[in-house]
Amino acid sequence: MCGGVYYAHNGEDIRVYFPNPKAVLPVKTKQQENKLIPWGRRKEQAGKMPLGGWARLDSIYAGRWDRWFPVAVKIPVKAFMEKDIMGQSHWFDLPKGKWIQGLVTREGQEQRIYVVTIEPEMEDAVHDRWPRILSG
């Protein structure tokens, strides 16, 4: 489900994991601007955004995110991390030209990003959700 990411920002390589309440993800805007946005919301964090760090693609299409004025964005990362059923972490490199789709939401002055997820195409996938990876 993408519990961590590895990316470069301002010449520095960064690894961040969702459980960290200070976790931010890189975003490339349509104006080609790079910025960092808080990754989801945890139970202990104030705010009105949905809990968690992921948004199912089918729930986006169903309009469940509309009240937070969602905007699809590119999350440019070098790799992302998933855990297997034994709790072991596995890193998956993203080839050049590919990115993870993100959903930026807002409520008043609060803004957060969620990783868009889909059902995995692999039949033997460990998780029922996988980050949506796009290119172009």
Image (cartoon, helix red, strand yellow):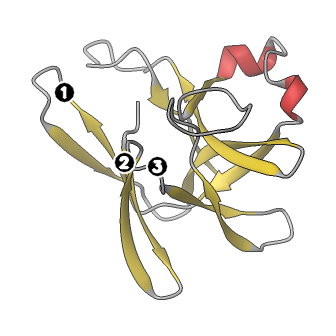
Q: Quadrant of the C terminus?
A: bottom right
Residue receiving disc 3: 21
Instruction: Give the camera-side residue of 46 and 95.
Output: 46
Residue receiving disc 2: 4
Amino acid type for the residue under numbered disc 3: Pro
Relative to 23, 105 lies left or right: right
Q: Residue at x 37, y 40 (%)?
A: 3
Relative to 20, 132 lies left or right: right
The disc label shown at residue 84, or none: 1
Determine the image quadrant of residue 51: top right
Residue 104 lies, in percent from the top left, at 75, 45
Residue 45 lies, in percent from the top left, at 56, 39
Labels 2, 1: front one: 2
Amino acid type for the residue under numbered disc 1: Asp
Q: Earlier in the sequence, mark 3 or mark 2?
A: 2
Q: Secondary structure at mark 1?
A: loop
Q: Earlier in the sequence, mark 2 or mark 1?
A: 2
Relative to 15, 48 lies left or right: right
Q: Secondary structure at mark 3?
A: loop
